[in-house]
Image (tube, grey):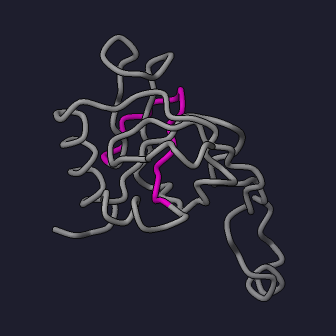
């Protein structure tokens, strides 16, 4: 991403999430539980839209930012926010997943900024973020 571009809270950015690292289970834990058959990744993968949730002071002063990925699958979980394509910069109706918070390198992972979410959507994201992090 260009150094002149400034990332802001509420921006929808295109992020390269690969490589993702599975469930983040340590080798020691895996060895202890040899009966575990589910080795599928629970982290979001591939290049996809994400919403910047880091504050703008951090965004101006850091080479990293905090994002939450969007996916086309909405399951109705309380830590998800439905973002409709008709009212946002996302190409199709998407679910913003507040259980998948990531710190990413702006230079290495952010491809572009495609727009920003409106205030009501960001309020819903803030509510789901507080729920996901047990801040209330």
Residue depicted at x 31% and y 31% = 117
20 above or below 11? below
Quadrant of the rendering where the C terminus is positioned? bottom left
Instruction: Give the magenta-colored segment's residue range.
Output: 65-78
Q: Nearer the viewer, residue 119 or 45?
A: 119
Image position, residue 11 (x, y; %): 39, 39
Image position, residue 90 (x, y; %): 46, 22
Residue depicted at x 23% and y 30% = 118
Q: Is residue 61 left or right of residue 128?
A: right
Q: Is residue 85 left or right of residue 28?
A: left
Residue at the farthest front position: 4
**Image quadrant assignment for residue 12:** top left
**Image quadrant assignment for residue 124:** top left
Image position, residue 44 (x, y; %): 63, 47
132 above or below 17? below
Image position, residue 48 (x, y; %): 61, 35
Residue depicted at x 44% and y 46% = 6
Residue at the farthest top position: 86
Quadrant of the rendering where the N terminus is positioned? top right
Q: Is residue 85 magenta?
A: no
37 above or below 83? below
């Amino acid at each position: 991403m260009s150094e002149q571009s400034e990332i802001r809270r509420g921006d929808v950015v295109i992020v390269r999430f690969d490589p993702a690292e599975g469930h983040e289970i340590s080798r020691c834990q895996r060895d202890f539980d040899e009966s575990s058959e589910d080795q599928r990744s629970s982290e979001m993968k591939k290049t996809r839209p994400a919403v910047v949730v880091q504050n703008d002071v951090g965004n101006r002063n850091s080479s990293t930012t905090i994002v939450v990925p969007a996916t086309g699958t909405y399951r109705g979980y309380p830590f998800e926010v439905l973002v409709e394509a008709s009212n946002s910069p996302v190409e199709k109706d998407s679910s913003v997943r507040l259980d998948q918070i990531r710190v990413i390198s702006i230079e290495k992972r952010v491809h572009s900024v495609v727009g920003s979410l409106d205030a009501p959507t960001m309020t819903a994201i803030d509510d789901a973020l507080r729920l996901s992090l047990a801040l209330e």
